[in-house]
Amino acid sequence: MRHQRSVITSVVMIPLGIIVGLPFYYIIVNTFKTQQETANDPFGWPSHLNLDNYVTVFQTLPIVQSFFNTVYVTVLSITLMLAVGSMAAFGRIVGKGKIAPVIGVALTIAFVVPGQATLIPLYRMLVRVQLVDSLNGLVVMYSAGSIFCYFLILGYMRTVPGEIIEAARIDGAGPFRIFWTIVLPLIRPILITVGVFQTMWVWNDFILPNVLISSQDKQTLVLQVYTAVGQFTTNWPAFMTLTVIVLIPMVIFFVAMQRHIVNGLVQGSVKG
Amino acid sequence: MTAQIQAATRTISVPRTRPAPRWARAREFFSTHVFLLPIVVVFVVIYVIPMSQSLYYSFTNYNGYSADVKNVGLHNYQQIFADSAMLSSLGYTIFYAIATTICVTVFAIPLALTLNTKFFSRNFVRSIFFFPAIPSIAVLGLVWTFILNPLGSGVLNTVLHALTGLGPVPWLSNGTLAQLSTVVVTIWALTGWHAILYLAYLQSIPTEYYEVATIDGASSGQRFWYITLPLLVPAVTVSQLLLMTNGLKVYDLPYTLTRGGPGFSTRTLTQSIIEAGIAQSRVGQASALAVLFLIVVGIVILVQLTIARSVERRLS
C-alpha cells in the first residue's frame, strides 16, 4: 500500500519536475546550437558540440569586467553589513543604558520600511556626493542590509551564554577584545548563514544597478544581461549563452553553500 | 558547585556596584555604545534623512532643480488618483501581490507535504523546484521574454502551434494575458523556495506526534488537520509575510518581462516611483507615492501579523 502510493507520487512528480525544469534545459541546450538549429528544433539535442556562441559572447561583451565589478560590490557590501550588524548586536547585548533599547525599536521600524520609499532622496544624495554611476555608491545603498543582519545576529547572540562574556570581563578583557576574540568566533554559524543570504541578494539585485549605474564598464552581471537584450534580440542562442555564463557563478556558490541555506531557513523558522 | 561559583562572582562583582569614578563610567558608556555607532550612522543616512525628505517633498512642488519650492499641501496625493499611470500601477501591484501570495501558497504547501514523504526521485524533484530561486529573478524574466515571444524565438508558441494548431498567443502584448503571465512566471520561480521553507517546518515536527495519533486511531486526514496544520501556522505566517511584502515591492520581474506594458497594464508602483522621481523629475509626486506606498506596506504587515497571531492563539 505504502509502496504503491510512493510509485504514484513518483509518476506525478517526475513529469511535473520536468516541466518546471524545462526552461533551464531549453536555455542550456540552445547555447550549443546555431540560430538555424534553434529555430528548427528548439528542444532537440545539438548536432555537434558548438561553442561559437560562447566565443561570440566573450568577444562582444565585457563579461569579465562585469564579473569583477559584481565581486567587488558583493564582497565589500557583505563585509560591511556583517561588521555593522554584528557590532550592533553585540552593543545591544552588553549595553545596559537606556539608549540601546531605543535604538533597537528604531531599527525594528526601519526593518519594515521598503527601499522604494527612500530611493528618490537617496539617489539625489548620491548625486550630490558624486557616488552615482559608481560601484561604491552601490555599496553605500546595500549597507541598508546591515539592519537585516543585525536582527538575525541578535537572535543568535541571545543564545550565547552571557557568563562567557562576563567571565572574560572579569578576567580583564576590554569590550573590543571580547567582541573580536570571543563573540565573533562563537557567532560564526550565523555570520555564514546571513552572509550567504545577503550575497544572493546583492549578487542578483537588479533594481539598484539599473537605477544607479549608467556606464558599461561599471555594470554588474545582471545589468549586463539586461542591457544585452537589445543587442541580441535576433541572436537568441547568444543571449541564452550569456545567461548561462552569468548563472554559473551563482550555481557554484549555491552548491557550495547549500547546507547553510537550508540551515538558515530552519533558523528563520525558529526565530519566526 | 554552581552556588559556589555564583557566590564567587557575587563577591567579585561587588566593587562594580560601588559608584565608579566619572571618567570610568564615561569610558564604559563609550566602549559599549561605540558598537552601536555604525548602525546608527546607517540608520540615519539610509532611513531617517531620506524618509523625512520624502515626507517633506511629498507636500511640495519640488522638481529636483528649482530653488523655488512651494508648499502645495495634499495636492500631490490627490494627483496620484488623477494620474492614470500611477493609479493603474497601484491596482496592478495590489493584484500581483495578492495573486502571487495565494497561488504560491496553494502550490507550495501540497508540494512540501509531498516532498516530506518518501518516493523515488524525491531529491531530483526537490532540487528542480528549488532551482529557480538561485539565479537572479531579473535574468529569469529576460529568459521568459524569449520563451513567451510571439515571433519565431517564442518556443511556447511554437510548441502550442505544433500541438494544437493555435496561432501565436500574445502572452506579453495583451494587457490581461501579460498580467497573468507575470503571475505565472512568479509562481514558477517562487513555489519551490516556499515549499522548502514549509518543508523545514514539517521536518521539525516530531514523528512521535504522528505515532501517538495513529495508535489512538486518528485517520490520516485527522492527523493532517490536528497535527500538521496547527504546527505549520508559523511557517504560513513567515511565508505569507514574505510573499505579500515582496509582492508589493516587486519591480524586477514585471519590468524585465514587459517594461510595464502593454500600456500601463503591468506597471508596478516601484516603477512609477522611479520614473516619476528620477527620469521625469516629478520629485514631489514621486515622494507622495513613496509615502503612500510605505503606509500601504505598513498596514499590510500589521494586518497580517494580527491575523496570524489570532489564528495561532485559536489553534494552540
Image: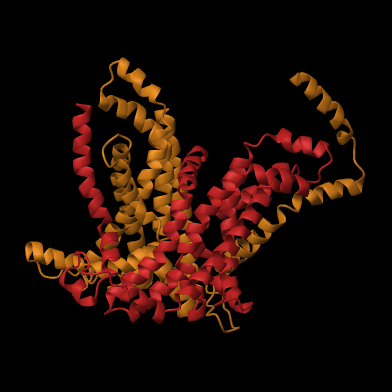
Chain colours: A red, B orange
Relative horizontal placement of residue B62, taking residue A48 as reference (left or right): right
Which of A175/B93 is in front? A175
Q: Residue at x 29, y 69 (%)?
A: A31
Can residue B87 be seen here? The reply is no
Can residue B126 be seen here? The reply is yes
Relative height, residue A127 to residue B145 (above, below)? below
Which of B48/B2 is in front? B2
Quadrant (top left, top right, bottom left, bottom right) of the C terminus of chain B? top left
Q: Residue furthest right?
A: B21
Q: Residue at x 51, y 58 (%)?
A: A199
Residue A87 x/y as whole percent: 68, 51
Which of A26/B241 is in front? A26
Relative horizontal placement of residue A158, taking residue B99 as reference (left or right): right
Relative height, residue B277 to residue B32 (above, below)? below
Q: Residue at x 31, y 15 (%)?
A: B215
Residue B135 x/y as whole percent: 40, 60
Residue B244 x/y as whole percent: 40, 52
Relative horizontal placement of residue A174, taking residue A138 as reference (left or right): right
Quadrant (top left, top right, bottom left, bottom right) of the N terminus of chain B? top right
Relative horizontal placement of residue B86, taking residue B48 as reference (left or right): left
Q: Residue furthest top?
A: B216
